[in-house]
Amino acid sequence: MKIAIIGAGNIGTHFAISFASMGYEVRICSPRYKEISKHLELVDEKDGLLKTAKIALVSDDMRACLCGANMIFITTPAQIADEICARILPFISSSSSICFAPGGSGAEFAFKPCLEKGAKIYALQRVPSIARLVKYGKRLWASKPRARLFISCLGGAKNNDFLEVLGRVFDCEVIFLKDFLNISLASSNAILHTARLFVIFKGFKEGKFYDTLPLFYENWDDESSELLLALDDELGSICKALSDFDLSGVKSIKEHYESQNIKELSAKIRSTPAFKGLKTPAVFVENKGYKPDFSSRYFVADFDYGLEVLVGISQFLGLNTSKMREVLSWYKCFNIASKSFNFTT
């Protein structure tokens, strides 16, 4: 099996190492290809070497990377989904299989032209592990893989061989979800990141700067948990309204974080080892301080391709998701040209 990976960030590098170390031919396509070694390393928390992987090709040439690929993994941010689709479309056919890692970002809207060419579009509900680059293009740390991976497919039935490969590479059980909405509605970042950003920056206006900012997760507070649970309740109302679909794969925030109330949720998020040290997305301006980094994927991907999708579906269903709309409206008040989707087609 030949694996093409679009993007070389945390997720792309993790997938490259995981497949290549199992003997698969891996090709990485990235505009930063000159910075990426063909010999990648996976390390533990103390930077001790766990495994190495040899990459067959590192390039920015999409044709070279996709030629003969059995599976194409898209690991780039959702905000460039239209651009990525346009670049890969000339090399896509009815035999192509594309997988978003992870899904739940609304990117399937951008890849509709690939569906029209007969391609199958898979999406993982969540990534196999939390991964962090130690040194770009060279070394990566990743948490222990999840026990189970959930996946769905647009444009065709499941490919059992591919699911078996995923399970073997990531040493986990792979569960196929029939209804793709289990992917679209299960991205916790769409409510988790947006709730936290709203709480941190709700008093922001142009010209305002902050002397300091809390760590995004380690300093998580009860106000953020309260809003997150309110958004999660509204997400639950969307799932309930979509009664024609089996959405048993969409788990609540309480279930996902094994927390039954605000205090437990805050403590759980603050204490998660993989979240340690992650900063609030912000830009530092000398002699002034910090302001929100609206170019961060926490903003662009999780509002435009996350919360925007949830609000659009709720409006299509005639639901009153007031908290979601309040948070989304706050984001849009900064005159950001956000993505819009047509849910009637």
Image: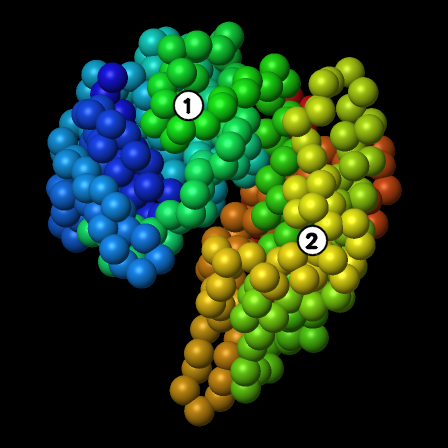
Whether residue 145 is situated above or below residue 263 in the rendered picture: above
Task: Indicate how the structure is coloured in the image.
Answer: rainbow
Helix, strand or loop at label 1? It is helix
> In the rendered view, does 57 fall on the left or right side of 301?
left
**Residue 289 at x, y percent in the picture:** 49, 85
Rendered image quadrant of residue 326: bottom right
- The residue shown at (78%, 58%) is 262
Q: In which quadrant of the rendered image does the C terminus lie? A: top right
Residue 219 in sight: yes
Q: From the viewer's side, name the closer residue of 26 and 147.
A: 147
- From the image, tell me which residue sits under label 2: 328
- The residue shown at (23%, 42%) is 51
**Residue 281 at x, y percent in the picture:** 50, 66
| Amino acid type, mark 2 | Leu
Rendered image quadrant of residue 28: top left
> In the rendered view, does 292 fall on the left or right side of 136?
right
Q: Residues within 10 Å of mark 2 (few under 14, many from 20)?
A: some
Observer-side mark, 1 or 2, equals 1
> In the rendered view, does 96 fall on the left or right side of 257?
left
Q: Earlier in the sequence, mark 1 or mark 2?
A: 1
- The residue shown at (59%, 19%) is 177
Helix, strand or loop at label 2? It is helix
**Residue 250 at x, y percent in the picture:** 68, 31
- From the image, tell me which residue sits under label 1: 167
Determine the residue located farthest toward the bottom in the rendered image.
287
- Disc 1 and disc 2: Cα gap in Å? 37 Å
| Amino acid type, mark 1 | Gly
Tags 1 and 2 touching, CB below 8 Å: no
Q: From the viewer's side, name the closer residue of 292 and 2.
A: 2
Residue 323 in sight: no
